[in-house]
Amino acid sequence: MSKRASSKHKIDRRLGENLWGRPKSPVNKREYGPGQHGQRRKGKVSDYGTQLRAKQKLKGYYGNISEKQFRKIYAEATRRKGDSSESLVGLLECRLDAVVYRAKFVPTVFASRQFVSHGHVKVNGRRVTIPSYSVKVGDLIEVKESSKQLAMVLEATQLAERDVPDYIEVDHHKMTATFSRVPGLADVPYPVQMEPNLVVEFYSR
């Protein structure tokens, strides 16, 4: 499992947006970047800068995926038929850590990555410890029996700050979720605007 290189709050501050829509985000109080130059007036951003920012936002949202992993997902998206930007979002939402997060078994995508890697999750009855594992339509994801009463899990299911999207069917009593379909960009409940088309442009330069 790749290690996250920077604090999730620093990602928010650097991008100047509340990436996960969380009430604790520092952007809610300080809408400027970190450091002594954070409040400087920003100049005009180039096309490259706009595309790079779009990539950083999407990559950061899913737990700051490593560049190597993210490029691999992009390569798979461009191999598929149809719109590459839609395929990119679909592949990211198929990640096991993303599905566990969407199902509200954990409060954050970072907690989801750790939750999976520590062996708390099963897919179709088998324990899976790889956060980047690709979930398929119809797969049953469940929290391991001994982990269902963890305080973090119980608190996450009660979170009012986000809802479970309709492409995941969840039973919080049994702590199970079924991945019913691969979503498109319009289906994913991002708290901020994502522009995967600019990410495709960034890599295809």
Image: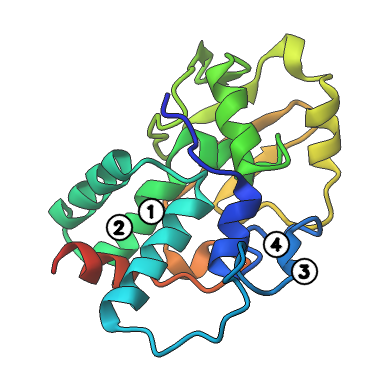
Q: Is residue 177 visible?
A: no
Q: Which mark is residue 28?
A: 3
Q: Secondary structure at mark 1?
A: helix
Residue drawn at x 65%, y 41% is 103
Residue drawn at x 41%, y 32% is 132
Q: CA distance from mark 4 to mark 1?
A: 21 Å
Mark in the foreground, 1 or 3 = 3
Proximity of marks 2 and 1: CB atoms separated by less than 8 Å? yes
Q: Earlier in the sequence, mark 2 or mark 4?
A: 4
Q: Which mark is residue 90?
A: 1
| Nearest to the observer: residue 196 or residue 33 | 33
Image quadrant holding the C terminus, namely bottom left
Q: Which mark is residue 54?
A: none
Q: CA distance from mark 3 to mark 4?
A: 10 Å
- Residue that badge 2 annotates: 87
Mark in the foreground, 3 or 2 = 3
Q: CA distance from mark 1 to mark 3?
A: 29 Å
Q: Position of residue 101 (x, y in %)?
A: 62, 41
Q: CA distance from mark 2 to mark 4?
A: 24 Å
